[in-house]
Image (cartoon, grey):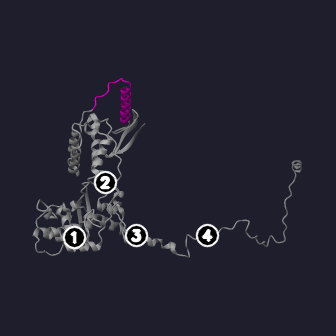
């Protein structure tokens, strides 16, 4: 049908490819370095399809790659990525639900739908959507991992409702002040020294998240080599992409880090108490939940009105955008590469909504109401006659006589 050049996510650049119709189905293949190579591959595919259809060439042998082999190859390919553990664990769980010895070519959309139906009773729609994405990604890479499956077309993804739920919980200034003051209270009877230290670390973790838009693991992985007090700059490694973000340090952040630097001793980590098996990093959630229970405030992702640590990232991005700073500057700090993703973290507040409504007060002035109907324009028949001018007074309008055709022709 067409040979064209398109942007390929797999190759990370624009590559040549073809989109054609073979055996009544739409086939597409990209990854060629030149237009000539793409046209040659398209011609070979059409010739092979013609020979198979008319019996000129023997049919190719069916691929014998099993799902177990594909999952093992995909898990090995995921090594070194951020989602290697969760994706590999998911693929193993999905493999356990399939018949033993199932071939890759035997996987259908109905089989994927069975997984969706079974998981609906266990987890949320967002989790199922991510799991199906990982499974379909594994099937789509089959041609890349096994040459015998290069021409195999993966099954279509089951029709699912795209999850649209997103968090819009923001931490107010008063709430942050109450939380931080409660977490930094003095040592109480019955508390161990380690728990009291980690409770203070949890307060610093929350405040740094509000001052930098950084995620939990990005903050807990900070080293003093990433902090430059001279240039007031903080190097944060993005948890998802692995890129380095240079975040300028404001006055409050500099004061907090100087205090931690004086108390850290010889440790190379900004949060030394979070290292090792003594205190798990996930225990900060337990500290926040206990503090909110003591304050009588909700905490938790599924609790109505509750907050979690990731809401500090939403709060910081929203505060910078509402202060009038450019979206590009905010994206450079938060680490977002797409404007759409950055705007997902921008939320309206009661103050911004009231400020926006004040712009509509211009329509409330009765003297210049734009919705009042205008008076109809006078037509030509109802206009009053024009008053005679000084030149036209005393002159008679003489109508031009129409001469006959004979008189005009005679003069001619």
Residue 80 is labelled as none
Residue 326 picture quarter: bottom left
For marks 4 and 2, give the CA distance: 54 Å
- Please determine whether, in this image, residue 45 is positioned above or below residue 88: above
Residue 125 is labelled as 2
Residue 79 in the image, given as x and y percentages of width and height = 20, 47
For marks 4 and 1, give the CA distance: 62 Å
Residue 119 in the image, given as x and y percentages of width and height = 27, 50
Q: In the rendered structure, which segment of residues is drawn in magenta? A: 36-62
Q: Nearer the viewer, residue 156 or 250?
A: 156
- Please determine whether, in this image, residue 57 is positioned above or below residue 142: above
- Tell which residue pokes out farthest to the top in this image: 56
For marks 1 and 2, give the CA distance: 29 Å
Q: Which residue is mark 3?
A: 353
Whether residue 229 is visible, yes or no, is no
84 on left or right of 377: left
The answer to which of marks 3 and 4 sits earlier in the sequence is 3
Question: Which numbered disc, 3 or 1, marks the residue closer to the eye?
Answer: 1
Asked if the residues shown at circle 3 and circle 2 are in contact, with their CB atoms under 8 angstroms apart, the answer is no
Q: Badge 1: few (under 14), some or many (20 or more) residues near its Cα, within 10 Å?
A: few
The answer to which of marks 3 and 2 sits earlier in the sequence is 2
Q: Residue at x 37, y 67 (%)?
A: 348
Q: Nearer the viewer, residue 324 or 393?
A: 324
Q: Badge 2: few (under 14), some or many (20 or more) residues near its Cα, within 10 Å?
A: some
Q: Which residue is mark 4?
A: 374
Say if the magenta span includes residue 72.
Answer: no
Asked if the residues shown at circle 3 and circle 4 are in contact, with their CB atoms under 8 angstroms apart, the answer is no
Q: Nearer the viewer, residue 99 or 231?
A: 99
Whether residue 121 is visible, yes or no, is yes
Residue 144 in the image, given as x and y percentages of width and height = 27, 39
């Amino acid at each position: 049908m067409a040979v064209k050049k398109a942007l390929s996510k797999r190759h990370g650049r624009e590559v040549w490819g073809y989109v054609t119709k073979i055996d009544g189905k739409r086939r597409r293949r990209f990854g060629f370095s030149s237009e000539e190579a793409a046209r040659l591959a398209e011609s070979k595919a059409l010739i092979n399809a013609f020979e198979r259809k008319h019996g000129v060439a023997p049919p190719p042998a069916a691929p014998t790659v099993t799902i177990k082999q594909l999952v093992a190859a995909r898990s090995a390919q995921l090594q070194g990525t951020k989602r290697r553990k969760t994706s590999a664990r998911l693929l193993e769980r999905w493999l356990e639900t399939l018949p033993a010895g199932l071939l890759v070519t035997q996987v259908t959309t109905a089989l994927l739908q069975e997984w969706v139906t079974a998981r609906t009773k266990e987890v949320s729609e967002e989790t199922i959507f991510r799991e199906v994405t990982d499974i379909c990604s594994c099937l789509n890479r089959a041609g890349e991992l096994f040459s015998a499956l290069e021409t195999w077309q993966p099954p279509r993804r089951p029709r699912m409702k795209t999850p649209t739920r997103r968090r819009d919980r923001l931490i107010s200034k008063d709430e942050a002040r109450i939380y931080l003051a409660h977490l930094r209270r003095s040592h109480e009877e019955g508390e161990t020294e380690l728990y009291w230290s980690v409770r203070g670390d949890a307060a610093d973790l929350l405040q740094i998240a509000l001052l930098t838009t950084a995620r939990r693991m990005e903050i807990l992985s900070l080293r003093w080599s990433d902090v430059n007090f001279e240039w007031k700059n903080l190097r944060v490694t993005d948890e998802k992409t692995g890129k380095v973000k240079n975040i300028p340090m404001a006055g409050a952040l500099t004061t907090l880090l100087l205090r931690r630097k004086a108390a850290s001793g010889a440790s190379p980590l900004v949060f030394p108490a979070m290292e090792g098996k003594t205190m798990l990093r996930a225990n900060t959630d337990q500290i926040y939940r206990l503090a909110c229970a003591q304050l009588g405030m909700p905490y938790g992702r599924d609790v109505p009105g509750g907050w979690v640590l990731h809401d500090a990232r939403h709060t910081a991005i929203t505060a910078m955008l509402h202060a009038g700073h450019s979206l590009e500057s905010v994206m450079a700090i938060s680490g977002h590469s797409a404007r759409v993703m950055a705007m997902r973290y921008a939320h309206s507040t009661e103050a911004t909504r009231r400020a926006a409504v004040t712009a509509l007060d211009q329509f409330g002035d009765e003297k210049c109401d734009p919705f009042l109907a205008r008076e109809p324009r006078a037509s030509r028949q109802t206009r009053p006659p024009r008053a005679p001018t000084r030149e036209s007074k005393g002159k008679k309008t003489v109508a031009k006589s129409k001469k006959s055709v004979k008189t005009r022709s005679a003069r001619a």
